[in-house]
Image (tube, grey):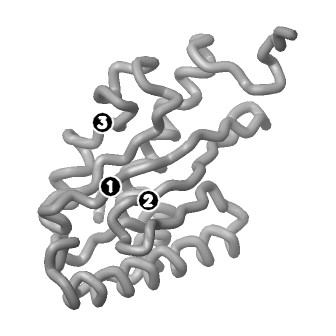
Amino acid sequence: MDDWDSTTRETVKKIPLLATKAGPRDGEAWNTRLKEEYKALIGYVQSNKANDSDWFTISSNKEGTKWTGKCWYIHNLLRYEFDLQFEIPVTYPQTAPELELPALDGKTSKMYRGGKICLTVHFKPLWAKNVPHFGLAHALCLGLAPWMAAEIPYLVDSGVITHKDNQTKTA
C-alpha cells in the first residue's frame, strides 16, 4: 500500500475488511461472508457518494452468486456507461471474480473473451496476498476502477468507442 497514491490509500482504508473465508458452496458460512460483502459494498458506495465519486451500481441474485449492474466513467465531461456482470467463482474468496463489461468485448487487448477485463498482472497478486480480507468492493475499487481509468480514455481517444450522443441513428 505504500506505493499507492494518497487518494487510493484513503479510499481503500474506508472499505471494511472481510473476515469469513467462505465461498458459495459453504452453506451458512457463505451467508456470513455475503453479509460482510454487502457491508463493505455499502460502505464503499457511501464513501463514493460522500466524495461525489459515485461510479457504479450493483445487485446480486438471491444466492449472491451472480452480480449485475452498471459502471460509468466520465471522460471529457461525457459519461460513458457500461453493463457490468460477474459470477462468484466456486473457489471464492481464494479466486477473485472475473469482472465483465460485455459491451467492450474485443475492443481492447486488455480484455479476455466475453468482455472479462484483464486483472492478472496488477490486481490478482494483490488479491492473493489479502485473502480472505478483500471482497467485491475491493475488486471494484482496485481492479475495475483503475482498469477503466486507463482503458476508457484510450478507447475514446482512439475512436474505438463513441459517446451515445455522438452515434448516428438509423431509422
Q: Residue at x 28, y 71 (%)?
A: 134
Q: Tell which of 20 and 54 is nearer to you.
A: 20
The quarter of the image holding the N terminus is bottom left
Disc on the earlier residue, 3 or 1: 1
Give neighbour class at mark 3: few <14, some 14-19, many 20+ (Cα, 10 Å): many
Q: Which numbered mark, 3 or 1, is in the foreground of this view?
A: 1
Is the Cβ of the residue at disc 2 closer than 8 Å to that at disc 1? yes
Residue, disc 2: 67
**Cα distance, mark 2 to mark 1?**
6 Å
Q: Residue at x 21, y 58 (%)?
A: 89
Q: Tell which of 64 and 57 is nearer to you.
A: 64
The quarter of the image holding the C terminus is top right
Residue 117 vs 35, above or below: the answer is: above
Q: Which mark is residue 118?
A: 3
Residue, disc 1: 87
Q: Which mark is residue 109?
A: none
Expressed as whole percent of the image width and height from the top left, the position of residue 86 reads 37, 51
Q: Tell which of 4 and 93 is nearer to you.
A: 93
Left or right, 31 with reference to 66: left
- Residue type marked 3: Cys
Is the Cβ of the residue at disc 3 closer than 8 Å to that at disc 1? no
- Residue type marked 2: Trp
- Element at label 3: loop
**Cα distance, mark 2 to mark 3?**
18 Å
Q: Residue at x 62, y 17 (%)?
A: 157
